[in-house]
Image: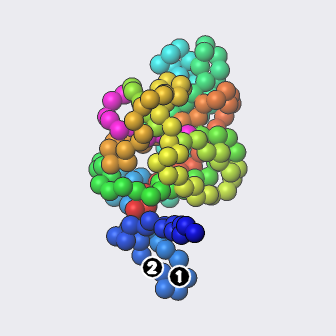
């Protein structure tokens, strides 16, 4: 008779026991919020780089949220709008999850991470569908992020190394023409 034992590996330094609910909590690091304490310079990159005419903006509001809004056009081989920012500091430990709090319009978006400061190159993308007019928190592991380049999935590329994340961004594409609006409150990593 074989004895099979299964262990659940949870790093001790990354968890805190909540005695009231008996649930494990993670240590949080804020990657992005829109308070004066965490200013980032957001850059708009739309399909105009390849002849398209989509428009977007990224506006930080007084209530410490941001609006990624605009209109996607499929004309002139276009079809995407994005915003991205260089992070002030790199993540210094392996994270368990990356969590974002957003309110959307029911459209599909992509959270995109890059491991360098370059304008072009590999982006690690994780798609999510926003819930119309409702704040939601979405959690992803590093395995959820797919390496892409200019809309194509890359093969034989090193998986996302969370300790090398340098850029964060949001993108709307996939033939979703028309107006869009994604509100973002924060993005955190859970260690």
> Looking at the picture, does residue 49 appear above or below residue 173?
above
Q: Secondary structure at mark 2?
A: strand
> Looking at the picture, does residue 50 appear above or below residue 155?
above
> Magenta includes 111?
yes
Relative placement, left or right, of 99 versus 12 is: right
Identify the residue shown where x is 43% and y is 61%. Answer: 190
Image quarter hosting the N terminus: bottom right
> Magenta includes 87?
no
Where does residue 5 sit, x and y in percent of width and height? 51, 68
Q: Secondary structure at mark 1?
A: loop
Label 2 sits on residue: 17
Q: Quadrant of residue 188?
A: bottom left
Q: Can residue 127 be seen?
A: yes
> Looking at the picture, does residue 185 appear above or below residue 172?
below
> Looking at the picture, does residue 161 appear above or below residue 98?
above
Where does residue 88 sit, x and y in percent of width and height? 30, 48
Q: Quadrant of residue 68?
A: top right
Where does residue 161 sit, x and y in percent of width and height? 37, 44
Identify the residue shown where x is 47% and y is 56%. Answer: 97
* Label located before the other in sequence (2 or 1): 2
Where does residue 149 sit, x and y in percent of width and height? 47, 26
Image quarter hosting the C terminus: bottom left
Identify the residue shown where x is 48% and y is 27%. Answer: 154
Label 1 sits on residue: 22
Relative placement, left or right, of 145 versus 95 is: right
**Who is closer to the viewer here, 135 or 37?**
135
Q: Which residues are magenta?
A: 110-119
**Who is closer to the viewer here, 1 or 171?**
1
**Who is closer to the viewer here, 132 or 66?**
132
How far is disc 2 from disc 1 in space, using C-alphas? 6 Å
> Mark 2–mark 1 contact, CB under 8 Å?
yes
């Amino acid at each position: 008779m074989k004895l099979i034992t299964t262990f659940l590996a949870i790093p001790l330094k990354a968890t805190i026991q909540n005695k009231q609910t008996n649930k494990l909590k993670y240590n949080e690091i804020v990657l992005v919020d829109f308070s004066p304490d965490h200013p980032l310079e957001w850059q708009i990159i739309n399909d105009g780089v390849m002849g398209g005419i989509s428009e977007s903006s990224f506006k930080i509001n007084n209530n410490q949220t941001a609006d990624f809004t605009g209109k996607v056009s499929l004309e002139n081989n276009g079809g995407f709008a994005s915003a991205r920012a260089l992070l002030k500091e790199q993540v210094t430990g392996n994270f368990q999850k990356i969590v974002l709090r957003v309110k959307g319009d029911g459209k599909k978006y992509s959270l995109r991470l890059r491991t360098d400061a370059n304008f072009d190159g590999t982006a690690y993308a994780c798609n999510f569908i926003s819930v119309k007019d409702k704040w939601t928190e979405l959690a992803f592991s590093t395995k959820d992020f797919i390496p892409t380049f200019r809309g194509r999935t890359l093969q034989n590329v090193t998986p996302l190394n969370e300790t090398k994340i340098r850029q964060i961004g949001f993108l709307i594409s996939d033939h979703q023409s028309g107006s869009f609006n994604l509100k973002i409150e924060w993005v955190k990593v859970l260690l």
